[in-house]
Image: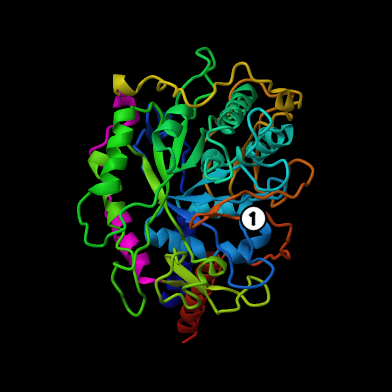
Amino acid sequence: MKLSALLVGSAVALLGAFCHDAHAQVLNPIAIKGYKMFDAKTGEYFMVKGVDYYPRPNAGELNVNNYDFFSDDHEDVWSQDLAYLKELGANAVRLYAVDPTVSHDKFMCALRAQGMYALIDMGASCLGCHITTDEAPACYSGELKSRGQQIIGAFAKYDNVLAFSAGNEINNDPTMKDFDNAPCQKRFVRDLREYIHECGMRHIPVGVVMSDRDRMINAQYYNCRTGPDDEFETVEWYGINVYLYCDAKVTKPSGGFAKLLTDFADMNPAAPILVTEYGCLNPSFPTVDGYDAQRTWTQAGWLYTKEFRDVFNGGFVFEYSTERANSKKDADYPFTSYGKQNYGLGYFSPEDCDHDKTKCKYNKMPNFDNLAKQYNSTDASDESKMAKFSPSSARSSPTKCPIEIKGLKGLDWSNSTDTKSLDCPPKEEFVCPGQKSSGKWFVGASSGSSSSSRAMTGSSKGSKPTKSSTSSKSGGDAKKATDSQAPATNNKSAAVIASVSWTVGLVAALATISAL
């Protein structure tokens, strides 16, 4: 046998092993102990280095708010982005819009292969899909309760679901009077937690995200028990959207960011605190390569210091790509000028790309590299493993409830309680193709469903289809619901195509040598 032929065979074997190892990694669920997050199996401390991800195109029917870009049908939309998110050093994405009636197997498995988790938002701006601005208890409907359970049923099988968010900034409507709808949000959290518990599924934490309005009153309320015997009404994590540190000359934690730290440190919350949106814009930031006001992301470095890690468990930067619909007023394509809504780490081109007839290509802005330097240089090696971590006694109990907001008792919740809970999802081990299972995480009995193991088939196995979308934030403006639907696509992952093309090319080249 020729030496070149041996080389061909060896190369193919090595490449096969390489490709297998690249996709066979194990990503374990994240568990909470006290106010910190850990790998549920290894016990390693986990700090969230996240990105708010909403890949909205510049034009076309999909240039809308509240759309689910993460389904199997949209593989051509999200597949290019995962490599960029990995380059950033991100380990989590926040998804503002999901439709629980379609399959997300491909996205969640591709995300898992990159070592990343997803924070799933649950609220929606469609009718009956969100906490309204009405006074409690009218602000919480049975339809919303069902929607939340439907999302849990659709996503609980994925071991890289970091957490569920029961709402995004329900306190940020200027037409709302005081805290009238806060008890509804708290009740929704309670019902979701109880559903997860009663179904015996993996313990996926449920929390909420608030805007930075009435900061401490809201934080105390969602971390307290208005009914001392109700273990489910407190959040299991708490998120706050803050836009602080707006002066490029500031190089040390001070002002608003320092106040954020002391406020939560003084409150002593028993649950993990996440900064779910951050990344203030200001013209004082430097111009780099023709792009004005490029964020330095100094605050990302602060957030992962020991001082901040003692209070916060990381956060999500806002946002992956500039949304032209929001930015065009003062910073239109190609988004080189400063604009109050030009929040992207990058942007899509060409100008008329629509994720359909004209595909969108992602282009990094200079602030992308600034964030990558911060995320890729984080070091939490001084954190204890879960088994050795002992929560502070000061942060081991629910906070004291603020007097400004009503408790849950004494309110008539028949709008939601009269709505029968959905059946529990099947207790089956979901395994991504080519990846290793992290194990079986469900417990107890399951509404007549037996435990089983199955691989991804690409089909959706869920509730009857209903159009749904989740509200999200675009620089302070809530995204509106949409009924638009995208055409189905079946493109392969860009990463897989690249790997296969490279492999075929190398083998062909070696085969040519063999023939000589």
What x and y, as percent, mark residue 430?
61, 41
* Residue 378 picture location, percent across and down: 28, 50
Give the x, y percent position of residue 43.
36, 33
Name the image quarter holding residue 45.
top left
Residue 310 makes an appearance in the image = no
Residue 96 sits inside the magenta stretch: no
> Is residue 213 shown above or below 236?
below
Which colour scheme appears in the figure?
rainbow
Q: Position of residue 42 (x, y in %)?
A: 38, 35
Task: State which quadrant residue 365 falls in.
Answer: bottom left
Magenta segment: 365-391
Q: Please name whichever residue, 263 or 13, is drawn nearer the observer in this view of the structure.
A: 263
Residue receiving disc 1: 480
Furthest residue toward bottom? 516
- The reply, left or right, for residue 131 in relation to residue 496 is right
Type of amino acid under label 1: Lys
Q: Is residue 460 above or below residue 516?
A: above
Count of labels in the image:
1
Seen at 66% across and 57% down, the residue is 72
Residue at (64, 63) in percent of width and height: 64
User: Is residue 145 visible to the viewer in this orientation of the structure?
Assistant: yes
Name the quadrant containing residue 282. bottom left
For residue 113, side relative to residue 141 (left or right): left
User: Toward the viewer: 82 or 286?
Assistant: 286
Decide if residue 257 is on the left or right side of residue 512: left
Name the residue furthest top. 229
